[in-house]
Amino acid sequence: MHVAEKYAFTPKVCRPYRAKTKGKVERFNHYLKNSFIVPLTVTFRQAGLVLDVPAANARIGEWLVTVANTRVHGTTGVPPEQRMPRERAALLPLPKVTLALPAPVPTLKQRPLPTESLQHPLATYQALLEVPA
């Protein structure tokens, strides 16, 4: 709300799961959850850790650069990183205001996380499906 007051806009509350008013936003939330949060949570659990906001914030930048902004967008047909310069040219400048941002949350030095894949060779899945005669 602080940012809304500073930039003189009023957030509009919409009903959840209403495609006509917020379908694109909800779809991104689904993508973020399934492509970033769930895999990172699993990786943390495998290492005996719990994913928290500072840890997610520390890794979101890399995910944006390597995954989200490089994928081909379903609606536009181009990666967001290619479309953003054209979009940026059409944006209006923000009003000149100074925001008092909260101090960054200090994080502990992070230990390397295992990179073991959760996927198995197809033969493993095939063996599970085969019924012994």
Image: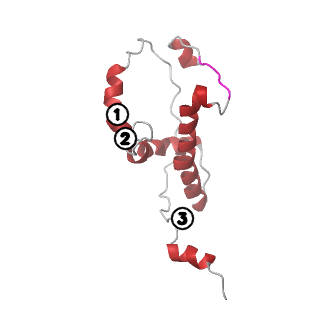
User: Would you say residue 107 is visible in this rendering?
Assistant: no
Circle 3 or circle 1, nearest the eye: 1
- The residue wearing badge 2 is 79
Identify residue type, mark 3: Leu
Name above or below for residue 57 compared with residue 97. below
Q: Secondary structure at mark 3?
A: loop
- The residue wearing badge 3 is 118
> What is the CA distance from the residue labelled 2 to the residue labelled 1?
7 Å
Q: Position of residue 54 (x, y in %)?
A: 54, 41
Q: Of marks 3 and 1, which one's residue comes earlier in the chain?
A: 1
Colouring method of the image: secondary structure
> What is the CA distance from the residue labelled 2 to the residue labelled 3?
27 Å
Identify residue type, mark 2: Pro
User: Would you say residue 99 is visible in this rendering?
Assistant: yes
Q: Position of residue 116 (x, y in %)?
A: 49, 65
Q: Of marks 2 and 3, which one's residue comes earlier in the chain?
A: 2
Q: Residue at x 47, y 46 (%)?
A: 59
Q: In the image, which residues are magenta?
A: 11-15
* Viewer-side residue, 28 vs 77: 77
Q: Secondary structure at mark 1?
A: helix
Q: Residues within 10 Å of mark 2 (few under 14, many from 20)?
A: some
Looking at the image, the residue that sits furthest to the bottom is: 133
Residues tagged 2 and 1 counted as in contact (Cβ below 8 A): yes
Circle 2 or circle 3, nearest the eye: 2
Q: Which mark is residue 83?
A: 1
